Image (tube, rainbow, N blue to C red):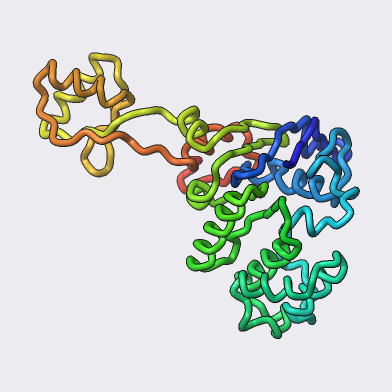
């Protein structure tokens, strides 16, 4: 388990992280989400002893990272896949890491195979593509067969096959009872991989909950209705106090449950060809929750903001 308690980090007058507290539990893939500048990277660096907290602490397996006797055997981490000497081969890079943590040499070959790098094991890492470098970083994180994994943007640079590989790998590792924490800006991928969410904004905790509960809490239920008499349906729903919007596919989106819509169209004899529950997304829920916590916001064409 990763336990974060009252974690705070200040740089001069700037507070990067303030009073964070949460637990990352074993057996789940936990997504660590937040806008740019939210404090995710700073928090992960403090988890791994790379930055010292101004206040609070992080414990992994009951102890701060710096007190772990064999850190690679307890925690596998990937923060920067490019932090590798470009003149070393992938094989030698992993051998050095293994020797420094008393990890058997056979494990090096196991993780190279697991990461799909067998054909590139003797190539210098300076020649690697972004995706190959990412695979090497993941192989290094898995080297000590750790119970805890902390991965920053693990799908960065991977091709579709690689994305699917890491998705299944992370879920399999969690199913074995390991603690898996990943940060990501790719909401669609997080939605396919993550069981639990920790969301921060401007250095503060915004949510600590399961995926389904998070989406339900931060999106509105509704249905899409297809009818040959949209104006009449619009009037019926508006008369019942239900907000209605036009969709690009010609349907009407109504902010109400299917049961209520069904009762209204039956009572008013409005012909309906289709009623579909609106599907909500992690991206929509995330954007709603973090709307006031976005530090860097791009202006859209015409001055509109997304």
Q: Is 104 rendered above or below residue 18? A: below
The part of the image, by quadrant, that contains residue 31 is top right
Q: Position of residue 83 (x, y in %)?
A: 77, 67
Left or right of 114: which side holds 243? left
Residue 180 picture location, percent across and down: 65, 49
Number of numbered markers: 0
* Residue at the image point whose x is 90% and y is 48% from the top: 67
> Of 141 and 18, which appears nearest the observer?
141
Is residue 39 rendered to the left or right of residue 252? right
* 296 to 289, vertically: above or below: below
Q: Is residue 225 above or below residue 126?
A: above
Residue name at image x 78 percent, y 30 percent: 19
**Front-most of residues 229 and 154:** 154
Residue visible at 28% across and 38% down? 247
Residue 141 in the image: state x and y as whole percent. 72, 61
Residue drawn where x is 62% and y is 58% of the image? 154
Q: Quadrant of residue 95?
A: bottom right
Give left or right: position of 278 versus 266: right
For residue 122, which quarter of the picture? bottom right
Q: x, y (%) of residue 246?
A: 27, 34
Which quadrant of the figure contains the N terminus? top right
């Amino acid at each position: 388990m990763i336990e974060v308690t009252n974690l705070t980090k200040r740089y001069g007058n700037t507070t990067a992280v303030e009073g964070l507290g949460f637990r990352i539990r074993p057996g789940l893939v936990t997504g660590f989400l937040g806008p740019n500048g939210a404090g995710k990277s700073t928090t992960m660096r403090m988890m791994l002893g790379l930055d010292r907290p101004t206040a609070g602490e992080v414990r992994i397996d009951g102890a701060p990272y710096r007190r772990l006797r064999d850190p690679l055997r307890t925690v596998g981490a990937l923060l920067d896949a490019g932090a590798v000497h470009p003149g070393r081969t992938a094989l030698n890079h992993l051998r050095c890491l293994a020797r420094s943590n008393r990890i058997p040499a056979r494990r090096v070959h196991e993780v190279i195979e697991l990461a799909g790098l067998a054909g590139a094991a003797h190539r210098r890492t300076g020649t690697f593509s972004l995706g190959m470098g990412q695979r090497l970083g993941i192989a290094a994180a898995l080297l000590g067969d750790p119970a805890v994994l902390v991965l920053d943007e693990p799908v960065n640079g991977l091709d579709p096959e690689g994305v699917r590989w890491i998705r299944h790998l992370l879920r399999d590792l969690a199913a074995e009872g390991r603690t898996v924490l990943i940060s990501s800006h790719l909401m669609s991928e997080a939605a396919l991989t993550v069981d639990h969410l920790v969301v921060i904004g401007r250095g503060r905790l915004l949510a600590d909950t399961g995926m389904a509960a998070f989406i339900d809490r931060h999106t509105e239920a509704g249905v899409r209705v297809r009818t040959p008499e949209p104006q009449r349906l619009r009037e019926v729903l508006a008369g019942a106090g239900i907000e209605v919007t036009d969709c690009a596919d010609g349907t009407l989106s109504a902010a109400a449950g299917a049961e209520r819509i069904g009762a209204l169209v039956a009572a008013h004899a409005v012909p309906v060809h289709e009623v579909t529950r609106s599907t909500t997304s992690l991206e929509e829920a995330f954007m709603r929750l973090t709307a006031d916590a976005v530090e860097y916001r791009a202006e859209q064409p015409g001055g509109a903001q997304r």
